[in-house]
Amino acid sequence: MDIDLSSYSIFNWINLQPAIHFWKTSRYRRVDRKYRKLPARVSKLDVPSNDRSNMIIAIAFEDAELIDWQSRLMRRFVPTADYIVVDNSKSIEGANAIKAICEKRRCNYLLAPENPWHGSPSRSHGLALNWALDNVVNVRKPQAFGFIDADIFPTEPTDPFAPLRQQDFFGVVRHMGERWYLWAGFCFFRYSLVERFRLNFGQAWFLGLDTGGANWNILYKHYALSTLMQMETSFFPFKQGLNLSDGPLQRCGSWIHEVGQMGLPEYAFEKRDALGRMLESNLKAID
């Protein structure tokens, strides 16, 4: 259970916070177990390629333009991995638009079951990841697999699975005090881990860990972070003179991340336009 009893004060115990947090976490886990068993609302999967032993799953949500860009760049720069879109969209219009892009770009597509946590983006995302783990990864059993956000894009030939020749997982590390976990928007794993651990890509909210953090107690705490390769990452404003927090983009090695949840809303369209210009030459080369 993702609760650290030693972190609660006497005041917390008097107010029954540990019991309340235990009950809420148990409820989240029950919803997760039930959701994992639901079938896809739409499934358009090809037979796995014999020459592709690795799989990358992108979790989509409402935004077809991102999937259009990402699917084309993945085909060009990460051609040795099967690329699968798992759509966590709430609206039928959003899902249909993403499905149409996947059909146009000839990439695998699944529409996940209706998500009960759409009011909580991080929790909804974690549920979709766990569903994809059970219903895609565990069905196909690749040599290795990875999860990426829909708004992260390779900009040159790359193999994010290469570090897995030397370690069990790889990605962008996030820290919370002494604990750490791989950001769920860019994380890669040997499939053998699934056979050893019951992975959980949800939150460990009462430990302060966001989506993917529930793997802290299951997996990450058993590894010394200092011995692992990590993806280098940095943030930068999408235009000069702008405060970083107002409109950030993120570099993850040679990948560019839009960081759609961060920044001022009034800059959202301008930031998307700037991102499109950064990707334009690579996208034109594909077309």
Image (spheres, grey):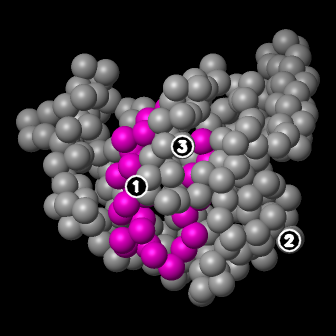
Q: Looking at the image, do the residues carrying marks 2 and 1 touch, with CB atoms under 8 Å apart?
A: no
Characterize the local packing of mark 2: few (<14), some (14-19) or many (20 or more) Cα atoms within 10 angstroms: few
Above or below: residue 2 compared with residue 144: above
Query: Magenta stretch containing residue 19, yes or no?
Result: no
Q: Is residue 189 left or right of residue 34?
A: left
- Residue at horizontal 85 percent and vertical 32 percent from the top: 31
Q: Return the mark for residue 70.
A: 1
**Residue indicated by mark 2:** 195
Q: Return the mark for residue 99.
A: 3
On the image, the x and y values in percent for residue 37 come to 88, 43
- Residue at horizontal 50 percent and vertical 51 percent from the top: 102
Q: Return the mark for residue 198.
A: none
Q: Is residue 115 left or right of residue 269?
A: right
**Amino acid of disc 1:** Gln
Q: Nearer the viewer, residue 69 or 209?
A: 69
Whichever of labels 3 and 1 marks the residue nearer the N terminus, that label is 1
Region of the chain picked out in magenta, as a range: 62-87
Distance from Cα at disc 2 to Cα at disc 3: 31 Å
Q: Secondary structure at mark 2?
A: helix
Q: How many marks?
A: 3
**Amino acid of disc 3:** Lys
Q: Secondary structure at mark 1?
A: helix
Q: Secondary structure at mark 3?
A: helix
**Amino acid of disc 2:** Glu
Whichever of labels 2 and 3 marks the residue nearer the N terminus, that label is 3
